[in-house]
Image (cartoon, helix red, strand yellow):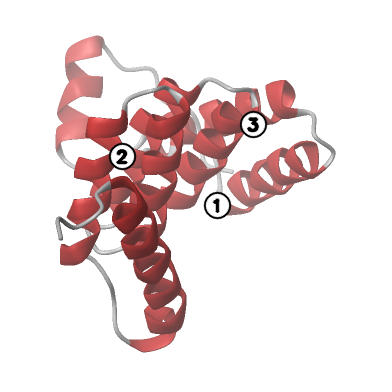
Amino acid sequence: MTDKVEVSMLEVLGLLKEGYTFADMQGVEPQQLEALYALGYQYYNAQNYEDAAKVFQGLCLYEPTEERFFMGLAACEQSLKHYERAADIYSVCCVLSGLTDPKPMYYAALCLLKANRQADAVTALQSLEIMGRDGKFKQQDDEFLTKGRELLALLQPKAE
C-alpha cells in the first residue's frame, strides 16, 4: 500500500480534477477494493442489503468511475424498496457506461414504475433505443433492449 499524504481541500479538489480518486489519495490498492466488492456481493447474496449498501457506498466514494460499484449500490437500494434512490443510482450507471449499457436504464425504469412514476419510466425505456454495445456484451444488451421494448409496448399500447 502506498503512503498516505495529507492534503488541503483545495489540493484534493485539484487532484480530483486531474482524475485522481479518493482511493488513489488514500493509498487504497485495487486488491483491497476487490476484497470490499466481494464482501458487498456476499452481503447482497445473503440478503443483508443494508450492510451491502454500506460497502457499496464506500466503494462508490473511493472509486466513483466504477460502474459495477454503483450497480451494486443501486441493486441494494432496489431490494430495500428505495425505488427512487435506486433509479437515480441506476441512471448514474448509465452515464458511467457512456450511455451504452442498457441494463441500468432498464432497471431504473422498473424502479420508476415501482415508485409510481410511469411517465418517467416510459422516458427511460424510450432512451434504451440509443444504447447497446457490440462484441462480448451484444447478446446481454440485446436481451435488455428486447425486455425494454416489450415493457414499453405494455405501457404505451399503439393506437389502432
Q: Secondary structure at mark 2?
A: helix
Total marks placed:
3
The residue sitting at 27% across, 51% down in the picture is 125
The residue sitting at 38% across, 40% down in the picture is 108
- Between circles 2 and 1, the one closer to the viewer is 2
Q: Is residue 48 above or below residue 136?
A: above
Quadrant of the rendered image containing residue 135: bottom left
Q: Is residue 146 left or right of residue 56?
A: left
Mark number for residue 91?
2
Disc 2: CA contacts within 10 A as few (<14), some (14-19) or many (>=20): many
Q: Which residue is mark 3?
A: 79
- Between circles 1 and 3, the one closer to the viewer is 3
Q: Is residue 79 above or below residue 65?
A: above
Specify which label sits upstream in the sequence, 2 or 1: 1
Distance (Cα) linking label 1 and label 3 = 27 Å
Q: Which residue is mark 1?
A: 30
Is residue 69 visible in the rendered image? The answer is: yes
Is residue 25 visible in the rendered image? The answer is: no
Disc 3: CA contacts within 10 A as few (<14), some (14-19) or many (>=20): some
Q: Position of residue 134 (x, y in %)?
A: 29, 84
Q: Is residue 85 left or right of residue 153?
A: right
Q: Amino acid at mark 2?
A: Ser
Circles 1, 3 touching at the beta carbon (< 8 Å): no
> Which residue occupies the foreground of this view, 24 or 120?
120
